[in-house]
Amino acid sequence: APAPALLELRDLHVFYGAIEALKGVELTVAEGEVVALLGANGAGKSTTLKTASGMLKPRSGEVVLRGERVDGIPSHELVKFGIGHVPEGRRVFARMTVLENLQMGAYRLRRPDPADLDRVFTLFPRLAERRKQVAGTLSGGEQQMLAIGRALMGKPELLLLDEPSMGLAPLIVQQIFDILREINEQGTTLLLVEQNASQALQLADRGYVLETGAVVMSDEASELLSHPRVRAAYLGEA
Ligand code: ATP
């Protein structure tokens, strides 16, 4: 039997003023999966993640978490429901230390767990070494690690990641993807937006392709990787 759905997005319509950015997005993430969300600039990938994390409220449609409707619940409340969001551009607290940033990730929890900090420092030894460093002076890759670590401090069952590889050198991108795999193997479900379609589909179980606010393809990641249309549009092949 298929794993039960952890997240379901049902017929989402999301507007910015008069602009309809999502035109009926449907998407399911099963417990334990890694799902990649691909699409060109402006297709609506970030908008989809922001709606799933409660940062945006859909005009119509539903965000369903483990069978329960959560659209309309603000993002800081959704942390308690087990959704973590690593936004585009990382957005760490630049003037706070690494440790303070991580502690901020746990402050909404009813019962912060010291083991979570150990887990993050084990996943990211670089952050452990730099725990007292001010976050604004970290490299881009380290800031991305910190943004992921901070989200993990909220004990997410589902981690939403918006372009974790953006602007990073290939070696660092590989490290980040290796760690994402480890995080998934430890039991966290991942929904990942990526321009780097090749890396994302190698990590993912399944993928969705968005075009102008709607899902135009969805399939097993291996199928998408070999699909001529995906290869031409997102993997840089003619
Ligand atoms: P990118 O990879 O460039 O971030 P994306 O697929 O994540 O693209 P979104 O950021 O979700 O796309 O944007 C979807 C559409 O909504 C685009 O047409 C964009 O211009 C529009 N949009 C996004 N944010 C806003 C905003 N704050 N105000 C108005 N329009 C917006």
Image (spheres, grey):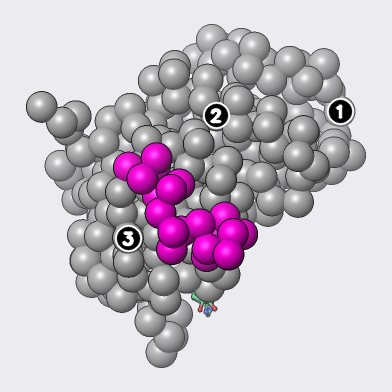
Residue type (three-letter) at the residue carrying disc 2:
Leu
Q: Position of residue 192 (x, y in %)?
A: 48, 45
Q: Residue at x 80, y 42 (%)?
A: 169
What residue occupies the far right of the structure in this picture? 137
- Other residues around mark 3 within 10 Å, as few (<14) / some (14–19) / many (≥20): some
Residue type (three-letter) at the residue carrying disc 3:
Met
Q: Which residue is mark 1?
A: 133
Q: Position of residue 189 (x, y in %)?
A: 38, 31
Q: Which residue is mark 2?
A: 180
Q: Quadrant of residue 229?
A: bottom left
- Judging depth in this view, the residue of 224 and 68 nearest the camera is 224
Give me the disc on residue 150. none
Do tag 2 and tag 1 residues touch (Cβ < 8 Å)? no
Q: Earlier in the sequence, mark 2 or mark 1?
A: 1
Instruction: Tell me: 128 left or right of 120.
Output: right
Question: Which region of the structure is painted magenta?
Answer: 220-238
Q: Earlier in the sequence, mark 3 or mark 1?
A: 1
Give me the disc on residue 217. 3
Quadrant of the frame with the C terminus? bottom right
User: From this viewpoint, is residue 81 visible?
Assistant: yes
Quadrant of the frame with the N terminus? top left
User: From this viewpoint, is residue 162 visible?
Assistant: no
Q: Position of residue 94 (x, y in %)?
A: 79, 44
Label 3, secondary structure: give it. Answer: strand
Number of the front mark, 2 or 1: 2
Q: Quadrant of residue 104?
A: top right
The CA span between labels 3 and 2 is: 24 Å
